[in-house]
Each structure stands twice: as C-alpha cells, then as structure tokens.
Amino acid sequence: MVYLRILLPILLFLHLRVYSLALKQDLIISRPLEDVVPVPNQIYSRLHTYAHLLDIAYCIDGLRRIEEPFGCELDCSALFPHLQLVHQWYFEDSSCGYIASTNETLFDANSTENNGKYTIVVSIRGTRSVSDTMTDLNFDMTPFAVPGNAIPACGAQCKVHAGFHGYYKDATAMVQPYVMSELKKGGPDAQVLIVGHSMGGSVGLLMALHFLSIGVENIYLVTMGQPLVGNREFAEWADFALGSRYLLNLGPKNRKWLRVVHRNDIVTTIPRGSFLRRYEQFDNQIYLNVSAANAQPRAEQVVDCLLGDNRQCIAGDVLLPRLLSDYLLSHNTYFRHLGLCGIHSDKRDDQETRSF
Ligand SMILES: *[C@@H]1O[C@H](CO)[C@@H](O)[C@H](O)[C@H]1NC(C)=O
Ligand SMILES: *[C@@H]1O[C@H](CO)[C@@H](O)[C@H](O)[C@H]1NC(C)=O
Ligand SMILES: *[C@@H]1O[C@H](CO)[C@@H](O)[C@H](O)[C@H]1NC(C)=O
C-alpha cells in the first residue's frame, strides 16, 4: 500500500510529462525556466497599435457607438484612416466589440501603399467586470470542443470556464458571418487580427481557436490582461494550436498569439479553481516589466517569458490583494490607460470601476 501511494503520483506525473512532450514535439525552442528574452523591436512597436485597437472597443457602450466609417474619441480616423467599420455589437451582459477592415497596413497611418493584404480586425471587450463573472459562475468548467478539424482536437478532458464559454458562443455566432464574408472579399491573403482586453481576451482566445479549427489559418491573436480560461489539457492544447512557444518573429513560422501580461496584473492569474478543477497558466507571456502606472514601457522592459511558471515573470510576482487599486491600475494599463473613451480626462479615477 505504501509503495502504491508513492508510486501512483510518480506514474501519473510521468504519464503527464510524456503526453506533454508528445504534444510539444513541434517546438523549435526549449530553454531554462528562468530565461527571458527581449521582444523584437518590430513587434514591440506594434504592441502600441494593438493596445489602441482594443481600447477603441471601450467607445461602445449602452449609449455610444463607433461612427462610420471609423470615428471615435480616441483619434480613430486620424490614426486609422484606412480602417472601415464592418459591424459593432453591444451585449449588455457579456461582451461587446467591433469588426473593421482595411487594405492598408495598420501600423503606419501615413502609408498610402496597398500592401496587398486585407486585414480584418475583431476587437472585443467584456461588459461585466471579471470579479462579477468569477463570483456568479463559481469557477464552473464546461467541456470544450471546436467545431472544425483543421487542427487536432483538444481531447476528452478539455474544459473551460463556463461563463467565458457562453460569451464566446454568443459573440462568435454574431461575428462569424461578417468575418467569413470579409475573408471572401479579401482573397487568399486576407488575415484576421483578434484583439481583446481582460475578459474580451478570453472570449477572443476561444474565438481564435474556433476560426483556426474551421480552416481560417491566417489568424493572429493579441490579448492583454487576459484571465486564465481552462484546465491543463485546454491550456496545453491552446498553446500548441497557437504556437505559443515559437520564437517571436514576423516570419511564417510565427506565433499566432501574443498574451501580454503587465507586472502585478492579478487578473492574468485567475480564476485559480480548486484541486480537481485547476485553471492552468499558459506558456505564452509577453511581460511588461514596469510598475502599475507606467503606460510607456521601453523596449527592454517588454520581455518574452515563454513559460507560464517562469518565476521572473507573473508567477514570481507577489499578488496579495493588499493594494487592490494598484492591481486594478496594472490591469488597465497596457501601453495606454485603457477604458477611458467617453470619460472626461479629469476623471481618471473612474477607470478603476469601468474598464474590464
Ligand atoms: C479593398 O480592396 C478591394 C479590392 O480592391 C475592394 O473591393 C475593397 O472595397 C477594399 N476595401 C477597403 C476596406 O478599402
Ligand atoms: C503623418 O504625416 C504628418 C505630416 O507629414 C505628420 O504630422 C503625422 O505625425 C504623421 N502621422 C503618423 C501617425 O505618422
Ligand atoms: C525587471 O526589471 C528589473 C529592473 O528594474 C530587473 O532587475 C529584472 O531582472 C527585470 N525582470 C525581467 C523579467 O526582465
């Protein structure tokens, strides 16, 4: 009996290791747990644009909308003169966002050269606070399966947060017809860029996996301040499907997902779950190594941590709910102070209650 008690966990552990090695055989890199590498400059400079695109989703609320062709308080038409609104939605109790498309590059407002690539932007935010969602839904997990088979299936044990799953279903049912028709318009090189902050990032992750599975291969996902989404089986599969452990570059063998995490952003480590239903951290972490209020990290302060349990990064942060306002500030500060669209700039304190 004693042997069994010792052996069983070891066997179980080995089984898990073999499984995860098999899953990750495609990796082009492996490195020590404590390593971090700087993010390439080209990608660093794009992060500001991604943050802006996700912030614009906060210009949609119960009263306001983005104006056609692409106008909003956050300099939408000045900085994205070529983007055209395709659709926007507001679901009072789950998510909201917009779809917009362009023939031009997103990264240079002054470019007039058609770069030959049609880009479809899907930007998502949550309408409820993360803590509301976590409390109401009690961390319940539900089985997750994607509709298509263009990528390997996640497996029988794959489970995700029941609340996020519901939001993803609603949002995808609404978004998919627009995205498919835009893809047709854009031709074979067309690409889909999904960006999401906080709960919108969780919805975006499930949506990206959904589109990948039905054969939309040119997909790129950027999440900032995104909570955890599912159990170990889900997290490993999502990392695998989206190439989390490819080195960051803009080449063809690129990572399809950037999961950006601000130092001390506690939201990126929850829900925790219980012993049998533990939520697993992803092996995808672009870490902003700056204090809560700093919206302008320098290039060397943005590092790729690769492994979810790298103690140099979020796993090593001391996340006591002691300075709650600090955590909220980290959560809302990704290359800009997010969630202020529609709020007069002298009422910045409001952002703590608004932006999830
Ligand atoms: C992009 O180009 C295609 C074909 O040239 C055109 O039909 C479409 O309207 C353009 N879309 C935008 C958003 O400019
Ligand atoms: C575009 O060009 C104008 C004039 O040359 C310049 O003032 C503006 O800052 C540029 N905008 C961007 C986003 O580079
Ligand atoms: C974060 O920055 C500090 C210096 O401010 C440095 O000591 C530490 O190694 C950095 N951590 C990472 C993960 O880059």
Image: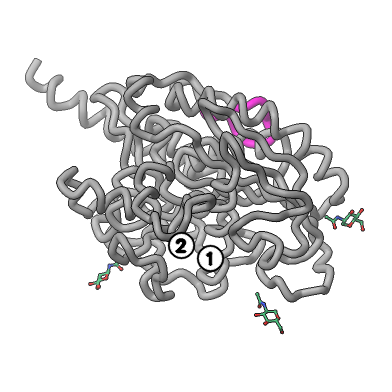
- Amino acid at the residue labelled 2: Arg
Marks 2 and 1: in contact by CB < 8 Å? yes
Image quadrant containing the N terminus = top left
Q: Quadrant of residue 109?
A: bottom right
Q: How many neighbours does mark 1 have within 10 angstroms: few (below 14), some (14-19), or many (20 or more)? A: some
Q: Mark 1 or mark 2: which is in front?
A: 2
- The front one of 114 and 308 is 114
Residue 12 image point, x, y percent: 28, 28
Residue most toward the top? 1
Quadrant of the drawing holding the C terminus: top left
* Residue 228 located within the stretch drawn in magenta: no
- In the shown orientation, is residue 139 left or right of residue 195? left
Residue 38 higher or lower than 71, as above or below: below
Task: Please indicate, yes or no, whether residue 192 appears anywhere in the rendered image.
Answer: no
Q: Along the horizontal axis of the image, is 245 left or right of 274? A: right
Q: Secondary structure at mark 2?
A: loop
Circle on res. 336: 2
The percent coordinates of residue 251 (x first, y second) are: 64, 65
Labelled disc at residue 48? 1
Residue at 36% from the left image edge and 28% from the top image edge: 132
Q: Nearer the viewer, residue 239 or 264?
A: 264
Q: How many marks?
A: 2
The type of residue carrying mark 1 is His
Q: Judge from the rendering whether residue 249 lies leftward or rightward of residue 192; answer left or right.
A: left
Residue 43 shows in the view: yes
Label 2, ligand 2: CB separation under 8 Å = no
